Image: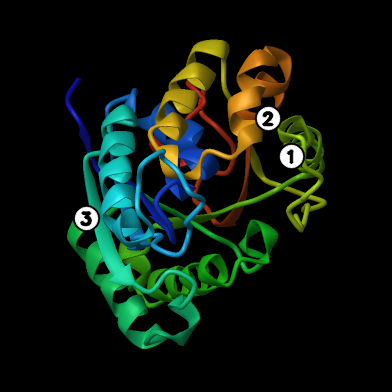
């Protein structure tokens, strides 16, 4: 299928954010032939978990870059910009430079829609919050006629409940400090096939697969309720809601 111009740009902080956070939204649009690009701010080199077996901590940046490449193929992304800001140190980096680089990508790609992190970072992650703020600033700096619609990833109450339940599957009680939103504007509800495609993309990030993400595969109902439910907040939208095909309204 021929890709449309003026597609979707997703701006994330770490390899795996794109799959775990917005894999369904990306798949829904790439499968409809909409060119979808990703900016990832860091190599995620601070996310050492001892995986995959035989890996070395000092090789994690290279491992995660390769995982992102595999996930991008699984999601059918048109292009990936992998930047090398320090994992866990985006807030200490030059915010004006990051904003300018995001602005440059928007100017080059001319997407209809940009999707990024909100000021809560979903669970307060400083890298998420910083990249979200820079993305918002870059979009706001565009001239009105060139400015894309802007959406933030969000956590609503059903998704927060999913994470609480799912994370117990790994045998631990460590819970993310999620910040559920009372109101979201758009919810992408995936069908069973789309959920499995999203799982395949998530599974590319082998170094980051917590025990619960492996255990959840034996709980299809929970998998559907959680991975199949992606809420977003419309910060500036030209066509709120979803089309008949379940795409963001800007692609009607």
Pointer 2 or 3: first along the chain: 3
Quadrant, the N terminus: top left
Q: Residues within 10 Å of mark 3 (few under 14, many from 20)?
A: some
Tally of numbered tags: 3
Asked which secondary structure carries label 3, the reply is helix
Cα–Cα span, label 3 and label 1 = 34 Å
Residue identifier under label 2: 226
User: Which residue is nearer to you in this view: 223 or 234?
Assistant: 223
- Residue 173 locus on image (x, y percent): 81, 45
- Residue 21 locus on image (x, y percent): 54, 44
Q: Are marks 1 and 2 in contact (CB under 8 Å)?
A: yes
Quadrant, the C terminus: top left
Coloring basis for residues? rainbow
Question: Is label 3 or label 1 in front?
Answer: 1
Q: Is residue 93 above or below residue 41?
A: below
Q: Which label sits on residue 109?
A: 3
Asked which secondary structure carries label 1, the reply is helix
Q: Quadrant of residue 145?
A: bottom left
- Residue 48 locus on image (x, y percent): 47, 56
Is residue 234 in view from this perspective?
yes
Asked which secondary structure carries label 2, the reply is helix
The residue sitting at 44% across, 30% down in the picture is 203
Q: Which label sits on residue 129?
A: none
Pointer 1 or 2: first along the chain: 1
Residue identifier under label 1: 163
Cα–Cα span, label 1 and label 2 = 7 Å
Q: Residues within 10 Å of mark 2 (few under 14, many from 20)?
A: many
């Amino acid at each position: 299928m021929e890709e449309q111009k003026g597609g979707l740009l997703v701006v994330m902080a770490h390899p795996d954010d794109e799959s775990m956070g917005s894999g369904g939204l990306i798949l829904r649009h790439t499968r409809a032939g909409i060119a979808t690009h990703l900016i990832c701010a860091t190599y995620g080199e601070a996310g050492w978990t001892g995986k995959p077996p035989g890996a070395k901590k000092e090789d994690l940046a290279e491992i995660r870059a390769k995982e992102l490449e595999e996930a991008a193929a699984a999601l059918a992304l048109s292009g990936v910009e992998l930047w090398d800001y320090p994992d866990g140190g985006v807030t200490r980096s030059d915010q004006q430079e990051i904003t300018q680089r995001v602005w440059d990508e928007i100017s080059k790609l001319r997407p209809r829609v940009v999707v990024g992190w909100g000021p809560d970072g979903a669970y307060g992650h400083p890298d998420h919050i910083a990249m979200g703020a820079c993305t918002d600033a870059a979009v706001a700096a565009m001239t009105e006629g060139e400015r894309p619609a802007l959406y933030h990833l969000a956590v609503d109450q059903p998704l927060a409940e999913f994470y609480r339940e799912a994370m117990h599957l790994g045998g631990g009680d460590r819970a993310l400090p999620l910040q559920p939103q009372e109101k979201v504007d758009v919810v992408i509800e995936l069908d069973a096939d789309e959920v499995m495609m999203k799982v395949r993309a998530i599974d590319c990030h082998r170094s980051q697969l917590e025990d619960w993400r492996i255990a959840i595969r034996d709980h299809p109902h929970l998998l559907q309720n959680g991975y199949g439910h992606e809420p977003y907040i419309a910060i500036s939208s030209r066509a709120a809601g979803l089309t008949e095909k379940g795409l963001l309204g800007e692609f009607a």
